[in-house]
């Protein structure tokens, strides 16, 4: 699994940095979260949480684009319940789409399951999308940036694989600014270092 690959890379190249990965979730906890959310998690999502039930609130490294940390099953379920109080049911039938037509532009849609964000779930997030646009795929990963939604990858496993591949190939590097670190993409020819989220938007 990709978490293991990412962990191995940091152990070999940046052992002083703590990814803040939590102990594994249990299969029972995954089933309970699925019941509470009314969804079935994709196999790769389940596998990732059986490796680690998210990260601590303030890890030293922001591994994923757009967000500070991966939430625990308990925290993402609580976030989803809080969002239900803010969702405008009239928006459910909106036909607004992103330019790729993969993502429905519906704020706090009940079939968007946020799984990574800030510790407070209050701004940029990554979500599993169970209500994709006509060109999207079931349970794809999307980013919420304020109220705009954009496609990221087909799955959490694909996202972790891309990060692990980039670290191994040297096209993704770790920034060293401030008290926390984030990943940045390095363009192969110019060696220009650009923000990870900006790079994902170009893909």
Image (cartoon, rainbow, N blue to C red):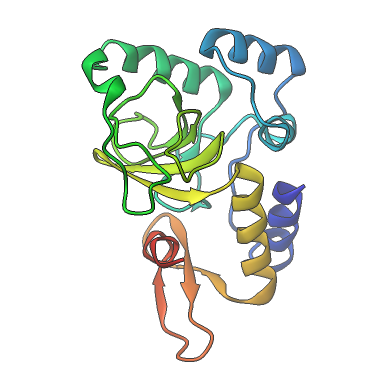
Q: Quadrant of residue 89?
A: top left
Percent from the top left, x then y, of residue 22?
64, 33
How many numbered marks have been drawn onto this rendered protein structure?
0
| Residue 95: % across, % down | 28, 33
Q: Quadrant of residue 176?
A: bottom left
At horizontal 39% and vertical 32% (from top left) the residue drawn is 119
Which residue occupies 72% across, 50% down?
A: 2
At a point 67% along the width and 18% down the height, the residue shown is 30
Tell me: residue 105, above or below residue 36. Answer: below
Q: From this view, report whether residue 189 is shown above or below residue 25.
A: below
Q: Which of these two is toward me, 140 or 10?
A: 140
User: In the rendered view, does 188 fall on the left or right side of 31?
Assistant: left
Q: Given the current orientation, which residue lies at the most extreme bottom position?
A: 189
Q: Is residue 98 left or right of residue 170?
A: left
Question: Residue 81 lies in what quarter of the image?
Answer: top left
Vertical position of residue 191 compared to residue 169: above or below: below
Residue 63 horizontal side relative to residue 160, left or right: left
């Amino acid at each position: 699994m990709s978490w293991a690959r990412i962990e191995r890379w940091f152990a070999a190249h940046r052992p002083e940095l703590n990814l803040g990965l939590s102990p594994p979730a249990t299969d029972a906890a995954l089933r309970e979260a699925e019941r509470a959310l009314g969804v079935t998690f994709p196999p790769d999502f389940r596998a990732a949480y059986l490796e680690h039930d998210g990260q601590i609130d303030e890890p030293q490294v922001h591994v994923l684009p757009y967000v500070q940390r991966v939430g625990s099953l308990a925290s993402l379920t609580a976030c989803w319940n809080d969002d239900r109080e803010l969702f405008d049911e009239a928006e459910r039938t909106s036909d607004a789409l992103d330019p790729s037509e993969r993502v429905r532009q519906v704020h706090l849609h009940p079939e968007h399951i946020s799984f990574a964000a800030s510790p407070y779930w209050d701004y940029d997030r990554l979500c599993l999308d169970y209500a994709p646009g006509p060109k999207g795929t079931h349970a794809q990963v999307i980013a919420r940036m304020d109220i705009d939604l954009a496609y990221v990858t087909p799955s959490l496993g694909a996202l972790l694989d891309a990060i692990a591949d980039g670290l191994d190939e040297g096209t993704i590097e770790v920034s060293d600014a401030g008290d926390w670190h984030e990943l940045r993409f390095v363009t192969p020819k110019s060696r220009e270092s650009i923000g990870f989220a900006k790079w994902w938007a170009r893909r």
